[in-house]
């Protein structure tokens, strides 16, 4: 494995800024690793090798001529195959759209290109982004790189992005999150995954599942990378300074630790069926925060997190059926049957039931804000258990037990890999914060982040 592919995006940007390497060398290193690993991992829907090399050479020429688009100019990235790029196919994980050529470029992708990032390819997704395990019966399920012997779930729906970043096929990437679709794959694959507040980043030009709930966010191997990529996606102008100084300029509190923060934990009954290694990792994370000066408090929420799974799912199903129902209605359409069943569930939801759910959502948002007044964050497990074999997946059960309430209440949150327990697979907790407090969520995640490694080579 090339040393370049083991580095974070900001570390690579630092090397490029100092002249220690070139955009072409960085891109070639990742493309070589993709060529070696992609056949076994199956992370990509399409690889843009020739175009990426051309873009890298152009970046080197521009930088040499004094035209640097910003501190991340020349750094590679991968993009979930929901995002339109003018003249290229966007399948949304569906065979139905195998020849669907986009006629415009999504604003989020335009922002990446304007920042000088180099797109290595589009990554696989659950069909129409409607599923948390990361499975895709027709287009292929990416392999979680943490177990090369057993095909384990990568998490979904941003499955390919998570596998590509975790396996060092790319330094970072973007996904979407409607019920956990950034945080779940980040958790299963040992990454930092930021679920942003809905509306913070535009979703135009991204194949929708649920416009009410859809959000865009980064998957990365460090909180620094996630913070900077969030800024790029929001079109925040980055100062053209040394990449090592970028985070301090953008978020001065990012590395100030957690001393003085009040961090809540869930009641004991919420852990009744959480696997022991995941529970141990969660408990160890809270102990670590307490040791760094945070006050750990109990909170009485106006709901049980499991109760929100169905409520969030009702919105997803109703709006998903509105977007894709005609395809699901036709039994001859070649769809993943698990996804078809979820979409058809939306057909049964009446307008009255849908509107009542939206009204209840608004009420519960206010109740949650009142219950957590004076609390900086809520820390929960990201998952009930580490990645299971694909052969053991029950598609009728969602792994999004702890993540969906974040979408339902329009909160932000970060899934972060943590130590604890004796699992050889990644363990993860999520740091949930109020809307538009992404910086605080990442700051607390930084205090917890212990596992910055790349999965072992096969």
Image (spheres, rainbow, N blue to C red):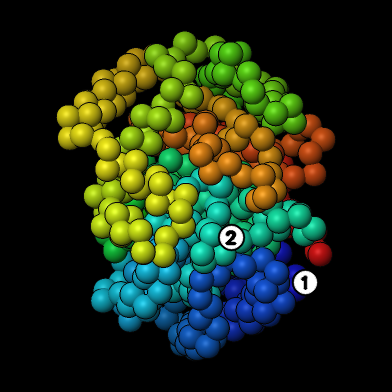
Q: Is residue 55 above or below residue 126?
A: below
- Asked whether, in this view, residue 400 is left or right of residue 21, the answer is left
Seen in the image, is 203 located left or right of residue 392? left
* Residue wearing tag 2: 141
Give the quarter of the image for residue 367.
top left
Which residue is painted at 41% across and 46% down in the image? 341
85 vs 438, left or right, is left
Instruction: Residue 114: give x, y in percent of width and height.
Output: 37, 72
Residue at the extreme front of the image, as rendered: 331
| Residue 197 x %, y % | 36, 41
Residue 282 or residue 39, whichever sits in front:
39
- Residue 266, compared with residue 245, is above or below; it is above
Camera sees residue 9? no
User: Pointer 2: residues within 10 angstroms few (<14), some, or many (20+)?
Assistant: many
In percent of width and height, residue 313 lies at 38, 36
Question: Foreground residue, 312 or 68?
Answer: 312
Quadrant in the picture for residue 288: top right
The residue under the point 57% across, 72% down is 17
């Amino acid at each position: 494995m090339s040393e370049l592919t083991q580095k974070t995006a900001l570390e690579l940007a630092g090397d490029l800024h100092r002249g220690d390497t070139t955009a072409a060398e960085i891109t070639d290193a990742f493309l070589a690793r993709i060529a070696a690993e992609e056949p076994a991992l199956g992370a990509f829907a399409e690889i843009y090798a020739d175009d990426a090399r051309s873009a890298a050479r152009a970046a080197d020429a521009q930088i040499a001529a004094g035209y640097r688009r910003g501190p991340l100019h020349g750094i590679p990235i991968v993009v979930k195959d929901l995002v339109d790029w003018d003249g290229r196919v966007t399948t949304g994980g569906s065979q139905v759209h195998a020849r669907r050529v986009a006629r415009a470029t999504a604003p989020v992708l335009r922002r990446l290109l304007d920042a000088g990032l180099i797109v290595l390819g589009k990554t696989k997704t659950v069909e129409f982004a409607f599923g948390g395990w990361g499975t895709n019966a027709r287009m292929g399920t990416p392999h979680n790189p943490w177990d090369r012997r057993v095909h384990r779930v990568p998490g979904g729906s941003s499955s390919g992005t998570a596998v590509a970043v975790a396996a060092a096929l790319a330094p970072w990437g973007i996904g979407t999150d409607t019920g956990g679709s950034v945080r779940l794959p980040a958790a299963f694959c040992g990454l930092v995954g930021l679920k942003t507040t809905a509306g913070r980043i535009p979703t135009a030009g991204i194949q929708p599942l649920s416009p009410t709930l859809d959000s865009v966010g980064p998957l990365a191997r460090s909180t620094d990378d996630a913070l900077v990529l969030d800024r790029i996606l929001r079109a925040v102008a980055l100062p053209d300074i040394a990449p090592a100084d970028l985070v301090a300029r953008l978020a001065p509190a990012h590395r100030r630790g957690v001393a003085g923060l009040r961090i809540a934990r869930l009641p004991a009954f919420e852990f009744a069926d959480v696997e022991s290694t995941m529970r141990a990792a969660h408990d160890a994370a809270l102990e670590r925060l307490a040791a760094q000066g945070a006050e750990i408090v109990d909170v009485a929420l106006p709901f049980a997190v499991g109760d929100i799974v169905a409520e969030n799912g009702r919105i997803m199903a109703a709006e998903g059926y509105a977007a894709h129902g005609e395809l699901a209605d036709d039994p001859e359409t070649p769809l993943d049957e698990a996804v078809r069943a979820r979409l058809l569930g939306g057909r049964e939801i009446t307008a009255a039931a849908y509107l009542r759910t939206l009204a209840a959502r608004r009420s519960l948002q206010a109740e949650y804000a009142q219950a957590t007044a004076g609390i900086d964050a809520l820390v929960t497990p990201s998952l009930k258990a580490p990645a299971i074999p694909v052969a053991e997946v029950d598609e009728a059960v969602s792994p999004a037990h702890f993540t969906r309430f974040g979408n339902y209440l329009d909160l932000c949150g970060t899934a972060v890999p943590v130590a604890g327990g004796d699992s050889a697979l990644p363990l993860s907790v999520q740091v949930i914060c109020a809307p538009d407090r992404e910086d605080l969520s990442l700051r607390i995640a930084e205090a917890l982040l212990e596992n910055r490694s790349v999965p072992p080579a096969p």
